[in-house]
Amino acid sequence: MRHLITPLLRHSLMPVIVVAQIALACAIICNTLFLLQQRLTPVLTPDGVSDPSHIIVAWQVAAKGSPWQTPRLLEVESALRSIPGVSATSVSGSVPMETLVQMNGNVLVDGSSSVNKANVAVYVGNHLLETLGLQLIAGRAFNLDEQAVRHQGAGIDDDGTTVITQALANRLFPKGDALGKVIRIGDAPDAARRIVVGIVRHLMRNALGQDNRENIDYSMLFPGLPGNWPLPVFTVRTLPAADLEQVRNAVKIVIERELGQEMVQGIAHYDTYQELRDAALAGPKAAAYLLTAVSIVVLIITLAGIFGMTTHWILQRTHQIGVRRALGARRIDIFRWLLIENALVVSAGVVLGMMMAFSINLWLMHHYELSRLPVAYLPFGVVILILLSQLAVLWPAIRATRISPALATRSV
Amino acid sequence: MQLEMLWYYLVLAYRRCLKNVAMVLLLTLTMAIGLASCMTTLTIFSALSGSPLPGISDRLYVTTMDARTQTDSDDSAYKKPDSYLSFDDAKAIVNAHRAKAQTALAQSTEQLIDPDSRRSSMASGQLAYGKALEMLGITLLYGRDWNEEEERARTPLVVIDSTMATKLFGIENVVGRPIRLGKRLFRIIGVYAPWKPRIKFLDLPHNEGTTLEDYQRFFVPAQAALDNGVGPTTLTECGKENALVTYQSTAVGPCRWMELWTQLDNVTDIANYERFIANYAESQHDRGRFVYPPQAKIFGTRAWADVNHVVPNDIYLNLMLSGAFLLLCMVNVAGLLSALFLRRRADASIRRAIGAARWQLFGQYLVEAVLIGTLGGILALPLIWLGLTIVRMQPVAYANAAHFNPIAFVSLAILSLVVSVVVGILPAWHICRIPPALQIKQQ
């Protein structure tokens, strides 16, 4: 080991620069990969909605002045259902991917301590299950009695029934016995009580924060409609054979006929759910592309740097290598020596880089509400960087083995 | 003499570059990418920070207080300064005339229609109580602003910008003509030059996530507007029994919806005004109208932008990322330059042996580093242009702010010079420390 380290310390400029470079690259890449994973969470997680291009969503249908009353909105819902080619329709407070209006509650199991609260997105609407095509894996949909409920407020303070996602069920009831249990929305003594009557496989939340890796699939459905709600969302599912554009136009005509006079002009949208989804995820996707590009460029620059520096460093030591060869070192010894030397330098850089990555992450957590960098990232980053840097010195090292001892000791 | 040497060093550096094109390409490209990423984020950052209205907004302050008139058991804490006041409170404070200029403002989005209903345009504007145009530094092209009597008499008047005038009437000077707004005709009494703050600062809490402001096409006295069916874009904070949010509603009743902006020129004015506001709020609290301790406070436009996160966190993250990236590129270039220089140890020691001083050698190598840095800076120009074009295509709130400007060009020049000097110091210093005799002997 000593014969490896001593020469490094004697001519320390190049190794120091390589260490600094690896450390910086490591710190940057760990943090960008972490950000990348967070940005990709909503893109890669299933939202639970099936056949997204057969759903028309009328959103940003805003009431001018005082909000429409629930019976009025339900009339519009039935008017939409009578459009030819429509298989299901629902008016609701919001839908996934519609980020303009959100309803969220902190949910806990009845009788448990408030430490176990989970932040959950609430979708209030009678027929969301069939309109969005959610997959019910246990329990039942809302029955007619439940659908007849009239909420005074938004519905979040009212008792009743609920359908929750599997992820939320597993979080609140790890034993898998969620059906029939009572959950509460908030920890106040008079907080609403909801009986779980059904579980769906997936339903994505629409209020996204910096980091949703844990709670992206925490959602629940309430029957009824939020009262005094200024921005109802109308969702219409078409039959597979129906002409989408015809249905889209019909939806627009019906809504403008029914509500046109009382609508804020010029802002309503009639998109397919797929279009809505694409628009909502455009931001995270763009950020993900950017972060991927940054990581790749950082890697390329680092590797090109290591390659360039090692090449020159080895050339500079042609004489030394020649002497080693003349004293009996075999080619494989030279090759191994250079690779081990590089591995040593890179490892030092990686260790330093990890420490930097963690301190940067701590600082970011403090200032920008980021979450903690998981330790699981470290071995991954270490292995990738060491392997790639070994690849980068492969060619210079092979060239070094070709140095002829006689020539090297004579000419340089 | 000095200049001659400099020229000679430049020629030498150029010749050396030609001898090792691959290495120089790698060096300049690395430098260019680092500079370009840093400059792209810096350009965007500088576009989104600073004064919304240079020369004017730094003297503007928004009044905040906990003016809730109903207790709220779910949400009793006053977590964030609240800038929305009821119309009555706003009027009372403006009418007290405790500052040079004061205006209560609220965002409105309305359709403006010419009297014959032939042309119409949806536009963003402001409902105002007080002398808005004067306070915001808006240039009147024709006509005048409204006065207090007209405001009190609830006369339906409006001031529009020249773009709107041209759009609806085909000419700019439309003073005296009527225009349809809400339920009736308003008389145009003034036309101003199109006005848009650099970044958004009005009505921020209602527009979370918005960074850039739109052109404000009209200003209308708030009371006259409400009388005739023109309300604020969004109306919140109307009390528990009412809807959480309503749009374009004129039923403002007890709602808190107006922001009060005040022009304060110096420290004494600020202190006096703050005292006045605190007294006003306390007296309302004592009378039992404000149910919570009001905690009245004023904020300048920049502080207010910070409180409301007008510059998104992503901007800061990208700025740090690109800074770290530039640092990486600099370390890389420093390493490669060292390698490049050290291979020419022989030249250096010969120059030393025949009488060159250390600092002369140092200068020579630094010139070479600066040459490479300058090449990198030139190469960075198209890359910055590309970067800003990419940002403009992104689905982000600040996309339209990504434009190349002369300041960015100058900063790029300075940055590349500084960076190349910093990067060149270590290798140049390292090589001129070589003892001449030993080096020659070793050869």
Image (cartoon, coloured by chain):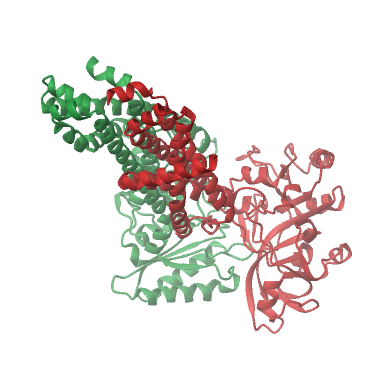
Instruction: Give x and y (percent) for residue A48.
Output: 33, 53
Q: If the image is split into quadrants, where does the C terminus of chain A sit?
A: top left
Instruction: Give x and y (percent) for residue A11.
Output: 32, 22
Find residue B222 and report its image quarter: bottom right
Q: Is residue B54 left or right of residue B18?
A: right
Q: Is B358 or A333 nearer to us in this picture?
A: B358
Find residue B196 and report its image quarter: bottom right
- On screen, residue B178 above or below A47: below
- On screen, residue B37 above or below A2: below
Residue shown at 58%/70% (left/top)?
A265
Find residue B333 and report its image quarter: top left
- On screen, residue A118 above or below A154: above
Instruction: Give x and y (percent) for residue B385.
Output: 47, 57
Q: Is B429 or A399 nearer to us in this picture?
A: B429
- On screen, residue B412 above or below B285: below
Q: Residue furthest top?
A: A2
Chain depicted in green = A
Tell me how many marks there are. 0
Chain B appears what colour? red
**Viewer can see residue A238:** yes
**Viewer can see residue A166:** no
Q: Is B355 or B105 nearer to us in this picture?
A: B355
Q: If the image is split into quadrants, where does the N terminus of chain A sit?
A: top left
